[in-house]
Amino acid sequence: MSKSNEELMVQINDAEHAWHDGLFRGAPDNLYVKNEIQTHDPNNQNLIVLNTRYFMDDGHPEITRGIQSYVCFETVKLELEYDKNEKNYVVDDWEQLEENHIEWDDLPIEVIENLGLKTYPSVFDTSIILEGLEEWYEDLDKVKFEDFPVILRPFIKKIIKENNN
């Protein structure tokens, strides 16, 4: 990707994040976000972007406190308009294309890879999770890892081990 394309993607990502943040009054905990340019009119600099997000939403049931039982998924078509005064993009219009819930172990590989690299523990509040595990199992040594999705077991084992040290 050329420097100008990289700069363009930074602006697109910033516009998308600002739009989600304003829409939800604080962006949910994103596990993975991908923005793809669908059309670009260089004459007026307007764009259509396909935004795909996997995120955790506080309003959904939990496996234990701090871990949602599934991941939310959405695809939105965003129309971005270039603001010549501010010299950046803003979301002018949007259309919801798809909205779903996905089980943790059914996440696509790129989301799982991103989850491993960037998410632990930033998306999960480890103290709340530990408190929930202690409350549910009465002792961290009694946690049944098979109760959790395979993808989350290493994370749970890691925070229990770190807590016991």
Image (cartoon, rainbow, N blue to C red):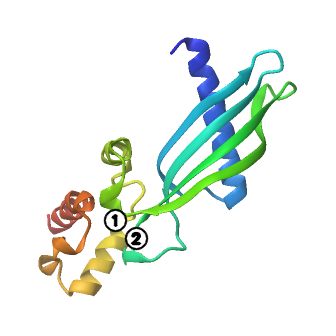
Q: Can you give x and y, in whole percent of width and height, for residue 12 in the image?
A: 65, 32
Question: What residue did someone put label 1 on?
Answer: 126
Quadrant including the C terminus: bottom left
Mark 1 or mark 2: name the one nearer the start of the chain.
Answer: 2
Q: Residue at x 16, y 76 (%)?
A: 144
Judging depth in this view, the residue of 55 and 118 nearest the camera is 55
Res 64 visible: no
Identify the residue at horizontal 82%, vertical 15% (top origin).
43
Q: Secondary structure at mark 2?
A: loop
x then y, percent, for residue 76: 64, 47
Q: CA distance from mark 1 to mark 2?
A: 8 Å
Badge 2 is on which residue?
A: 66
Task: Give the percent coordinates (x, y) of residue 71.
Answer: 44, 61
* Displayed quadrant of residue 8: top right
The residue furthest front is 97
Amino acid type indicated by mark 2: Gly
Q: Which picture quadrant has residue 4?
A: top right
| Residue 59 drawn at (x, y percent) | 55, 74
Question: In the image, 138: left or right of 44?
Answer: left
The residue carrying pointer 2 sits among few (fewer than 14), some (14 to 19) or many (20 or more) residues within 10 Å by Cα, namely: many
Looking at the image, do the residues carrying marks 1 and 2 touch, with CB atoms under 8 Å apart?
A: yes
